[in-house]
Each structure stands twice: as C-alpha cells, then as structure tokens.
Image (cartoon, rainbow, N blue to C red):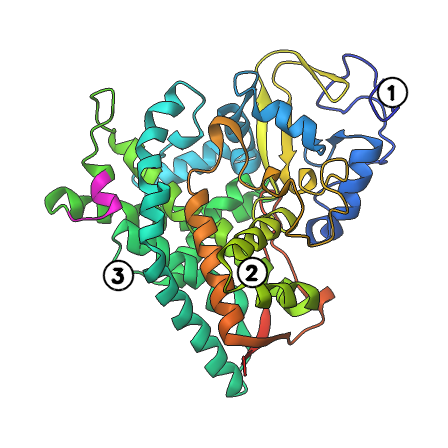
Amino acid sequence: MSRTGVSDPAGHCPVTGGARSPLEGASLTEPRNIAHPHEFYRRMRTLDPVYFDEKLGMYLVSRYEDIWTVLKDPVTFSFKKGYEDTYANGHFEEFRRLLERDGQGFFPDVIMEDPPAHTRVRRLTEKAFTAHRVATLEPRISEIAVDLIEGMVRRSEEGEVVDGVTDFAASFTIKVICEQLGIRHFQSENIQRWSLAYVAQISRMQDREMMIENARQVCELQNFIIKEMKAREQEPREDMISDIVHAQLEDGTTLTFKEAVSIIRALIIGGNETTATALSNLLLLLATRPEIAARLRISADDDRQLTRFVEELLRLAPPSRALSRTTTREVELGGKRMPKGTQMLLVFESGNDDETEFACPREFDPERKNLAKHVSFGGGVHRCIGSSLARMEIKVAARELARRVGDIRLTIPPEEVQYLQTVATHSIKALPLRAFRRS
C-alpha cells in the first residue's frame, strides 16, 4: 500500500504497468499535459506518485521526496543507463549509423557517465563555471542583454512583432556560450536548430522520420564543432574550446577526441537551450502575470531581492521538465517495487510544484523560506554544471528587462502559446510579442 492509499501489486511488470492506475491511462505526452501540466502533476502526486505512463513506457516520479531519493543514489538509479535507454526513442542504432556516416562519428555523452567515470570529466568542466569566473562575465553578459532588449523595443515601437524565443531568449544564451567557447563566427539560428535537434533525442516523442531529420542536424553540429577543435589544435586561444582540446586532467591523462567532442557539444547545448527556455518563461510570465512584473520592477536594483526573484522563477517555471534514470537492481520507490532495468522520469517540474514541500506552489513568492530547495538543476553528483552561469544570465536579463521595458504584450491569446513536443523540457515554440520602453 502506497502513502496515498493506492494499492499496487508487488512485482508488476514495468513494461505493462501492472494494475490499472487511478489516472486511467493518462500520459505526459498528451498535448494538454505538455503545455499545461500542473493539474496532471497534482493528480499524480495525490493518486499515483510513481505512475507508469504506458505511452512513454516509463514511470513518472512526481513527488519531491521520491525525486530526492533517486538523486541521492546514483548507483541504484543510473543516469547513464537512463540516458542511453531514452536516447533516439527506439531508433538508436540507425541514429548511430547516420552520425558515423555523416557526422564524423558517434560520440557518447561523457558528462552523462555514472561515477567514478563521471568524476574524471566533471572536475574539468566545473573549472569553467566557478562562481568567481562567472562573476567576471557579468559586464559582458549585461552588454549582450541590453543590445537585444533595445533591439526588441525599437522594433516593437516601429510596429513590428518580435519573437521572444528567437529574438531574445535563444539569441542571448547562444551569444553568451559561444563567446565563452571562443566561437567567433556562428549563426544563432543554426545553433538553436542544432540544439533542438539534439534535445529531441531525449524527448521520447520523435518518430523515425523526425529522428532522421534531427540526425542530419546533429551531424551539422558535430562537423561545426570538429572544425573549431582542429583550429585550436593548430592555434590555441584563450577560450574554453582550447582549454578542452589541450586539457590535462587531474589523473594525468588527456581527453580522448571523442570525449572532447562530446563535452564541447554538451556545453553548446546545455549552455543555451535550457536557459533560453527559462528566459522565454520569464517573458511569458511578465506578459501574463502583472503581479510578477510588478515584483520584478521593485526587485531590479536590489541584488538580494533580485537573486530571490530568480530562484523563485526557477522553481515556478523550471527550464528542465524531467530527466531519465534506469534502476540497476530491484528497488522500492514510492511504495512500488521495481525490477532491475526499470526506466523512469524524474519530473523536476512536479517536484517543484509539490504542495507538501512548497506551500501554495503556484503562487510566486520570493520570500518563501525554502526558496533554494527547488530541483530545477537536478541534484547530487549530476547537478547541472552550468547552474551558476544560468543564474547569472537570468538575473542579468531580468534586471535589464525591468530597467528598460515597461510593458510586454503578447500578440496572441496566452492559451494559443505552443510548446515543443518533448518530455525533457517545458519549452515554448514561439512567443510573438511587443515590448515597450519603460517611461
């Protein structure tokens, strides 16, 4: 018997889901749950907190405490296996062949490794995102934000509709991460397209035709990365790609070519896509929830208040929806017994919405006492490496929006905002709006 009082037969098969859930076959993949999932999450937490989603073929872990049980045990709940089991949604071997044929190779994601292999490369990448180093980037990040915001305002005042996703959120994060990597010549629309194609591999919702097109985009990304790497091999610069190509690890070894490609690829994608999602969510909230816009205006010039604003934004509208794990042994979670090899999704967005952990979770309250307990960046050994940079980018963008923009108006009804079909992130496809200068 689970904590909620819903019985679950021991030893049910994770492929079929066993006894029928009181959620009656509901799925995270349904369009209404992709776009507006919070009622679905609430029902899961109440009725079936470790719920087998038949369409996904995975358990959805929805309660905060169960999510943390998994995060604290990376041996039993393997990130590496979870990632591999989700990858390419049943088309993995064909995806691999396409990358080997047209993208110079298939390069496994080394940052997704489990310990101790994970520790070897994590220490290297952590050096790029220390609090001190990120703090030194703030003036340049501010310049990028101001330039893009002024462009949005100017075009809006000329009567043009801008896209908050491509014209601000994605452009901003792509420029920041490309500058850090040392990529001097790039097109934002290409980076954005490649990033979405890569994230689609863990969307759990692409068919074979989509996989083939996304594989083509990933090949373009890898060819782009390898060209940059070869240039640094010949002529090192003061940038992150040079650091990775010529890195000496703590154990005295160097990165293999495959490891270096995968790390740079992860930095490009992780350094822009999820943070762009957070900034798109910010724009939508400012346009549709006047109490949040008012709160930002009074917080913008107070560093403490602005920091708390960003943390509550991350809790309320996290950039990552869910990430996968696979069990390496039989284990009980949330009152259910799971065999070895059970696939699950940790639904961080639901954990952040758990009313047993966060009072009145749909309210925006930067003064809540447990503000920093959200799981928007995961937790444990696989906590997001770039979280300090993401926080800085969101903080700078929020501050400059408050200082320069007095009114953001959607040009479509809020209910017509569309979202990418993925379980990995809660990403807005496009956000048509006009932004008007603060008087």
Q: Are marks 3 and 2 in contact (CB under 8 Å)?
A: no
Q: Amino acid at mark 1?
A: Ser
Crowd band around label 2 with a 10 angstrom C-alpha radius: few (<14), some (14–19), many (20+) = many
Query: In what element is the residue under mark 3?
Result: loop
Does label 3 or label 2 sit earlier along the sequence?
Answer: 3
In the rendered structure, the answer to whether residue 368 lies left or right of residue 140 reads right
Query: In what element is the residue under mark 2?
Result: helix
Q: Amino acid at mark 2?
A: Ser
Q: Which residue is mark 3?
A: 185
Residue 423 against residue 107 in the figure, above or below: below
Report the Cα–Cα distance between label 1 and label 3: 58 Å
Crowd band around label 3 with a 10 angstrom C-alpha radius: few (<14), some (14–19), many (20+) = few
Q: Which residue is mark 1?
A: 7
Residue 421 against residue 115 in the figure, above or below: below
The magenta region covers 237-243
Quarter holding the N terminus is: top right
Which quadrant of the structure image shows residue 410? bottom right
Report the Cα–Cα distance between label 3 and label 2: 25 Å
Q: Which residue is mark 2?
A: 280
Residue 103: x, y in percent?
A: 33, 43
For the point 54% across and 83% down, which residue is it?
Answer: 439
